[in-house]
Amino acid sequence: MARISFPKDFLWGASTAAYQIEGAATEDGRGSCVWDSFTAEGRIMDGSTAYRACDHYHRWPDDIALMKEAGFNAYRFSIAWPRIFPAGTGAVNPKGLDFYDRLVDGLLEAGIRPMACLYHWDLPQPLEDRGGWQGREVIGPFADYARTIAARLADRCKDWMMLNEPNVVAIFGYGVGEHAPGHRLGEEGILRALHHQNLAQGAALRALAAEHAGLSLGTVINLQPCRAESERPEDIAAAARWDAVWNRVALDGVMRGRIPALLADKMKSFVLPGDEEAIRYPLDLLGLNYYSRMTMKAEAGRPFDVGWGDAHCDRWTFMGWPVQPDGLYDQLMEFKRDYGNPAVFIAENGAAYDDQVGPDGQIHDAERVAFLKDHLAAVGRALADGCNVKGYLCWSLLDNFEWAFGLSKRFGIVRVDYDSCKRTPKDSYHFFKSVIRDGAL
Ligand code: FCB
């Protein structure tokens, strides 16, 4: 492979989510969130919980040291909404604010640019009890939460991402019930959850822009190219429908203030006049997540009559997801073509593998190294072809609580022993470090 060089000011680092790493679920006044309830209902596949997770809430200085040692210059973390507003609205919890204050200072001291994400899925349970993302009641509280945390941190933290993957929240959380809050509301539930997240995002973006100058405002969307399983017209139509639901409600919402034509009919009962203007916002920096392409087929009885097709792939991760680095190139180039090449960064990309600790105590995760190498090469190709991509944050720094899969799927470049919480950098960590050091692959 020819040498690929990345720009000097490229952002290098990792992303994490509060719920997946922090632990300390009942400490310092944190309120409960929908994932606590979902876990308590016994809906996590391996029966594990995130009550301790990686214990990042106490071990964050060690984690920053790991990032510094790897040469990171950026780090995306999420803020736990229930730490800031334990009841979703009303009283602010000062200890929650203090935690992120210390974290941001620690990152800056280590020369790492903090990139805060406001909503990585931990909706305060009291807000879910009032309808959650099915209704509009949550929009005001979300904007207040954004204002409150930014008032504390925006003097030092300049990058703000509103949401993480609103489609996953909507589809898995409200549509098919595989994620918290576990509802099976089908198509309308999915589209309502998407639309109300779009509205909350628009309100929060406007609140932050009005109250602070000089911030870089964005959001994070997992834009996954949708392909039909076959040439059959019904599969092609199914892939187009899935593209509208999975990608376009969120992306066209913020970028264009537009409801996808394919879904307009299904959304008309809850989209009000003025909404399209309210969801549109000129972002400074958009985060894109990428894991694989989506291969779809027509399948009756599923939301939007779309099912998962056979990806015809010969490499798979431990999640059962196909390894398709070309899809990352497609994601970036199709985005450039369709949206006018605004600034983006890869906000998540990575893989779970069935890591083993070797007799030498190390984790020789050759498959993850190959995964990262191939995907970084795809980013390099997109850069060479003019895509305005500003950085690459892998998923993830640490093995962590992988939502409904609990602790059974390891995505980290650093292993976490869940008994002792000991961290061990894997081969993929050392590989990533060398790419960052060289600025090249
Ligand atoms: C993404 C999520 C992230 C993690 C990875 C594997 O969809 O944003 O929290 O679960 O997948």
Image (tube, helix red, strand yellow):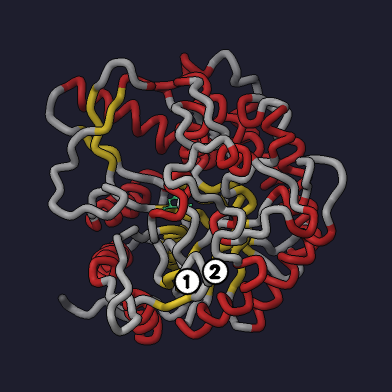
Decide: marks 1, 2 in contact (CB < 8 A)?
A: yes
Amino acid type shown at disc 2:
Tyr
Numbered tag placed on residue 75 in the rendering: 2
- The answer to whether residue 70 is visible is yes
Pointer 1: residues within 10 angstroms few (<14), some, or many (20+)?
A: many
User: Is 297 above or below relative to 82?
Assistant: above
Looking at the image, which residue is at 67% across and 54% down? 25
Residue behind mark 1: 13
Q: For this view, does 338 lie left or right of residue 57?
A: left
Image quadrant assignment for residue 378: bottom left
The location of residue 37, given as percent across then percent down, is 62, 38
User: Is 66 above or below relative to 143?
Assistant: below
Pointer 2: residues within 10 angstroms few (<14), some, or many (20+)?
A: many
Which SS class for mark 1?
strand
Image quadrant assignment for residue 274: top right
- For marks 1 and 2, give the CA distance: 5 Å
Looking at the image, which residue is at 66% across and 42% down? 33
The location of residue 303, given as percent across then percent down, is 38, 22
Image quadrant containing the C terminus: bottom left
